[in-house]
Amino acid sequence: MTSSGHRVLGLVLGAVAVFMLAPIAIVVVNSFNSVPYGAWPPPGYSLRWYVNLSQQTDFADAAVRSLVVGAVATALALVAGTLASLALIRFRFPGKAAINGLLLAPMIVPRVAIGMAAFTLFVRVHVYGTLWTLMIAHTALILPFAVTIISGALLRVRPELEQAAQDLGASPARAFLTVALPQLRRALVAAAVLSFVVSFDEVDASIFMVSQADPTLPVAMYNYMQKYQDPTLAALSTILVAATLLLAVLLLRSFGVSGFAEMVERPRGQPVIPGEADV
Amino acid sequence: MRAPARRPARWRPAGYLFLLPALSVLVLFFLAAMAVLLSFSFERFVGGRFLPGTTTGNFTTFLGGHYYWNVIATTVKLGAVTTLLCALIGYPTAYALNAIRRPLVRNLCYFALFAPLLTSVIVRSYGWSLLLGDHGFINQVLLSLHTVRTPVPMLYEFSGVVIALVHILLPFMVFPVVSVLGQLDPVLELASADLGASRLQTFLRVTLPLTVQGLVVGCELVFALSISAFATPSLLGGGRVQVLPALIYNEVGGLNWPLAAVESYALLVLALAVIGIFTLLLRGPVARSRGAT
Amino acid sequence: MARQLTRRDFLIMTSAAALAACGGTGASRTVSSSSGGKLPKGPVTVTMFVFLGGDLGKMPKAFAQDYMSRHPNVKIEIYEDSNTVGYPKMLAAKQTTPNQPLVNFGFFNAQTTAQGILDGMWNRLDYNAMPNVKDVLPIFRRDDRYGIGIGSDQLGLVYNTRLISPAPTSWTDLWDPKYRGKVTFFDYYWYPVYIAAKMNGGGLQNMQPGWDFWKAHAKQIRTIVTSNPQYLDVLSNGTAPLTSYFNGTALQWKGGGAPLEYVPPREGAISVPVYLQSVQGNTSDQNEVVTDIINQMLSPKWNQQWAVTSVEVPANQKVQLPDTMRSLPAFQRSTVEKLQTVDWTVVARNNADWRQKWDQDIKANI
């Protein structure tokens, strides 16, 4: 690519990065605010909200709970979502349009209404407040993301290669796992990241489904916000963002992986379908 | 380029088998909850309490109210504007991300895209209010440069809600496009260039059609998420941006669950209809893109 | 029908509180807790609804610890939530499993108390089995015995001291042209509409003049807020330096360093009592324990803690308030004399309609 092309792309990325990071940067600065209310510029600087955060014991438990729920729900959604995508893309069957709509629906119905209804449901069958109900609920809520992204990518994975593998004696499952799945790697990682983050940030429905004694992190944050109005949550967010950055750097160092980009991108120059290289 | 020898999809019961895990999760949780909502929608809520018997009055109240149609219009407008902006910003971003070779730069860009998702909506909105407020960062810069005499109202307006929604939904546009771009065969672009096509021609004739599927997925995600967003319009709309999800939230708190249920179904129908129309409109280009490989 | 608080009642109340404060020692007598072995001996677990906000959880939590140490067979679980989110959950649980209430007793504001009466949520309390009730000011007792008051907060004007001078004095300041575009309200806040209705020939039963008035004056409002941190920010950073809100919350913000002050309007602030309620569907053992707990919470010691942490007028006339509290504007005799009271049953009946009017007539026009 020419240097002018690079410059344009660089400008695009730079502008987008500033746009994405600006509100976070301002939150980080405000977490060192000396007063409880938000104002720009802060009237003074202090560490009092970090000290206050260290005295809140609930957040650590809630964070662990959110990590567990997010991880389990993401894993379930990826497996169920990949299988469902296969069905939608590779098979023809009656009622497909309806099922397609149904798979998308949990993303659209407002979470607060789902949460309210789910609460009634859980109480009726005596499972309210259990962690596994929350995991199933989150799986349903993030399934649309997994299905949409994976099936979008699966559309571009041609069944012919798998057919070839099967012709050579591989079982259909093995053919899929060894031929198609590697091509889906990028979509799977994208789906996993978005699913996990949606689960980790979910508050509207969860606030009805968790018991107040065992909240997830966003619910704990919401509760804190109702009690006290100060930048402690800004301090907590700063730590979350910093921890993610640190985790990424550590992964980079210890595994020699060049980070997220490497994970989602297949080696360059390798055509999806080898035969087409000699067009 | 040769046309693909694409096998027609086969009708096999196995299709249902593959759907089993997803469907059981949906039936166990989502459909059961939706059934509860449906039963709420026929209940009678009068004078602050639930009365025995059923009614269809909640539906007629909603469908007959001029006010509710205004809210629906605002909701669709918010979704459309947000989706359009996300597509316009997100596609070039994805393209640039895909083109950049230096791992460090690429990783930093991914981090920038990803970081906002790690802060809760409350904290993000707090950040935006410090940036966009009448006495916020941007207005202070504009005032000190004498660009404007009075603060530009951005916060607690439609524009502020759009800015914040584009910010948080951009990753949902970029990721699907990047994932499709990654599957794209660079040889095709090279071949196009070899055949004498300009870069713009190559992009318009080869790259864009081939990646339109990712764009469609992104638009579906962003549209669905933006019309069902509750917290951002509530926190940054200042009461001026009345959308259906915020209305539903208020009805739940106000115990008017029957109306909340009707509004939830209305939102679902609205979203499915718009996405359906969208998919139909794009069926042509998408089909062509598949034929092109 | 709940008895309405009158001006006279409050006069009696403050003078009684002042007397108790001056008299000193008389208030220290504690009432024996359990009345003659009526309490269950076996293990009992009860869940207490506690307000989510500021220091409102402190007294209930301290009380629970103390009570459990004195009654090893009783376990008190804390359910901390706002009435806005928590009550819908309680109602949903009641409709689904009426014999397993989400919580067994707790703290509820006046409006939720009235809503609960409509929904058949509360037990009638046996005031005769509660020795401390005799020290509770009559206005906090209820003729229908659905719960009993523990304290009362008030709603007036809250303003930014750096940006508004002189201080606002009247409800009419909310629609004074000089504050056009400078007022903020919480999302769904009917009180200024009620005040406007009253001043324009209407009232709680006829709110239409109030809706018409605010529809015409909607441009006074700079923004509607939906969360407390946002509320604190727009008031403090100058986006909208004037509002109407609770004395208790405003003082909490002021204490944290925000440049805010509470003013009781000269036409009278609105008094907002807090009630202790026992929930229907409790077992008889639970009811015995709940009655005993509510009684003990009304003792001078615990009621004083509640009044101080919530900045409310205490229900028990033997409570001594600290001087710092008695010198606050909200506790002045002139303020208390003018307090306005509201028929919360009318509020509960019309709440859903008012909320829609708020969205359609006011929010749609700002």
Image: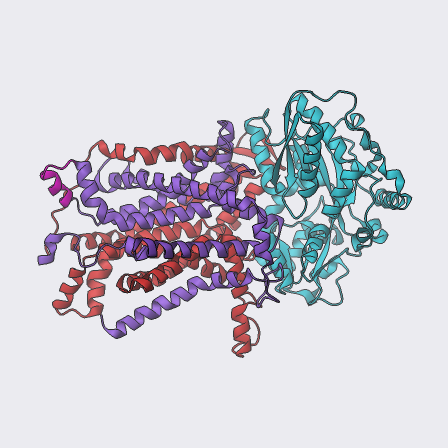
Chain colours: A purple, B red, C cyan
Is B272 above or below relative to C174?
A: above
Residue at the image position 40 percent from the left and 32 percent from the top: B28
Name of the residue lying farthest toward the bottom: B146
Is B100 above or below relative to B24?
A: below
Q: In which quadrant will I find the C terminus of chain C?
A: bottom right
Residue C360 visible in the picture: no
| Residue A98, horizontal then vertical, whole percent | 32, 38
Residue at the image position 73 percent from the left and 28 percent from the top: C291
Horizontally, is C149 left or right of C186 in the view?
Answer: right
Compare residues B82 and A213 and report the one nearer the observer: A213
**What is the chief secondary structure element of the magenta stretch?**
helix
| Residue A253, horizontal then vertical, whole percent | 34, 57
Residue at the image position 18 percent from the left and 38 percent from the top: A174
Is B36 above or below relative to B228?
A: above
The magenta span reads A160-171
Compare residues C331 and B59 and report the one nearer the observer: C331
Q: In which quadrant will I find the N terminus of chain C?
A: top right
Compare residues B67 and A276 and report the one nearer the observer: A276
Magenta segment includes A162: yes
Horizontally, is C354 left or right of B103 in the view?
Answer: right
Query: How many numbered markers are drawn?
Result: 0
| Residue C126, horizontal then vertical, whole percent | 76, 26
| Residue B32, horizontal then vertical, whole percent | 43, 32
